[in-house]
Amino acid sequence: MRLFASVPQLKTPAVPDEAREMARHPPAPHRDDAVFLPHVDAAALDVFARARDPRDPFELRDLWLGRVEHALGADALRPGLAERWRSARPLRTVDAEEVLGSRATVRMVKELFNWFFRDDLYGALRERSDVILSGGSVSEEVWGLPGALKQCVRYALDRDWYGYSDSRGRAAARSAVAGYENARIEEGGYDESEVAITMGGTAAISSLADLILTGPYGRPNDSGSRPPVLCAIPNYPPLVETSARRHPVRLVPLPSSGGRVSLAPLIEAIRPDTPMVLLQTAGNPTGAAVAEDELAALIRAAAPSCVVVLDECHEWLGPERRRSAARRSPHVVRVSSLSKAWSAPGLKVGWILADRRLVDEYHEYASTAFGGPPSFFYTVVEVLARMERWMAEGLVEPGAAECAEFEAGYRLRPDGLRAAYRSYRLERRAREESLRVVRAAAVAGLEDLPARVVPPLYSINATVQFPSFDDSYLCFRRLLHDTGVSVFPGVLTFCLGGGPVRVTTSRPWDDLALAFSRLGPGTSA
């Protein structure tokens, strides 16, 4: 049995002329100076002030939703929650620092996140959801896995490669990932001992939080206190919640402007005994990225005993850049997955890069907690990493040397590898080009609405603020009711003030065009 015995079938998504025409109109230059800052506004403070027990996240969730139901008036879905809000009265004074440092805040946002998907969008409101722009991932039916990687899945199935394996992943796959990452970072030098294959980004960060915060890093300091983990916001609720279940957490709002995130507040918040920092290197939902010089300053500011966890999953579909050597520091862990950049969230596959000692500790943790990652996808990871490395190095056509990188059991032939690499390069380039065009067209289409758009520099999401809404969950509910278009409330990324919502641009163009036509007259509260 031979890998790449046949030429992979090409899948190059076509971009409609309408989208290409809209993409030719770039964002207005003045918007680059606008600052986006997740913050806690007076309305959010009012929710905490009215709670009988501000430590109860479920009461806080119900008050937040009750306020939304009250504002919907005759269109309210749950009058009991609306009445609960109307009957509540302010009981105390609350400030933003209290909210940002509260365990209940993190759980409240996670429960709102659960409610959004379980009870609203795919629950009671499912029939209203005609156009879903709130998913946060690439439409895999339009921009799916390249044909060469699909062949790897079929090959693994035919070889019955789904047995037990090393809890860090197969050595060949880890070695391939190390080579790929060395091609993207200054002063490379990763080897397989510094790589572990994981079950996607969310599971990886949950495992890391458990490993780090229940071990020596999370122990009380000399005074007996437990200094908080610093979680930069905006952020993804499951990642913050998984840290807060194990250790005190403080949310740190980071401003962004012109596609760049400022790390100054996070650097200022770091203490000598801070156990862990959680940071997305490209923001969700803004698409703004950290600058390498500021990231290096953050890593230097963190003590060697502080683990800096970098969620790099959204750092794609933007300007190419070399990662700084600071990301290779012994107390840094980098997390990647196939969910976004390769349109495969359902495969639950990714990897971490870390110091060898931490990877060894992770091996013990993984072998105890869940055994190991899915061995079925090791060939996918190996081939993907090798071909991505070749592309980063500018390789046009693989030869005998590249063929020799794979073990003899694959029975690869140079002609088969050349055909697979050729198709992979074509698909990857066509995919990224079409996603960039659609993203630019979507931003232009949103700009034509009565809305303020934060143009993303990376990833597939855009942050939108409709001027009629000062509550993001109310914006979601009202737009869905009036237009059938679903957006993602900013509160679900810890934007606890104002009405910013997230729109995922990597959807079929027909869906985006339909959404724009409907949202025009349907954006008032």
Image: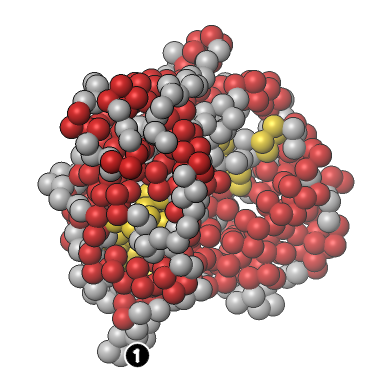
Q: Is residue 72 left or right of residue 499?
A: right
Answer with the quarter of the image where residue 510 lies: top right
Q: Residue furthest front?
A: 1
At x 46%, y 50%, the residue is 161
The quadrant of the rendering that contains the C terminus is: top right
Label 1 sits on residue: 224
Q: In x, y percent, where is residue 343?
A: 50, 37
> Does residue 24 lie above or below 444 as drawn?
above
Q: Is residue 357 left or right of residue 165?
A: left
**Mark 1 surroundings: few (<14), some (14-19) or many (≥20) residues within 10 A:** few
> Does residue 256 lie above or below 374 as drawn?
above
Can you see residue 109? Answer: yes
At x 57%, y 71%, the residue is 104
At x 55%, y 46%, the residue is 346
Q: In x, y percent, where is residue 118?
A: 71, 54
The quadrant of the rendering that contains the N terminus is: top left
Q: Three-letter amino acid code at disc 1?
A: Gly
Q: Is residue 500 left or right of residue 335?
A: right
At x 49%, y 48%, the residue is 160
> Does residue 336 lie above or below 456 as drawn?
below
The residue nearer to you, when weighing 440 against 317, is 317
Q: Residue furthest left?
A: 187
The residue nearer to you, when weighing 30 against 304, is 304
The residue nearer to you, when weighing 150 against 98, is 150
Can you see residue 95? Answer: no
Q: In x, y percent, where is residue 143?
A: 52, 28
- Element on which disc 1 rests: loop
Q: In x, y percent, where is residue 178?
A: 25, 48
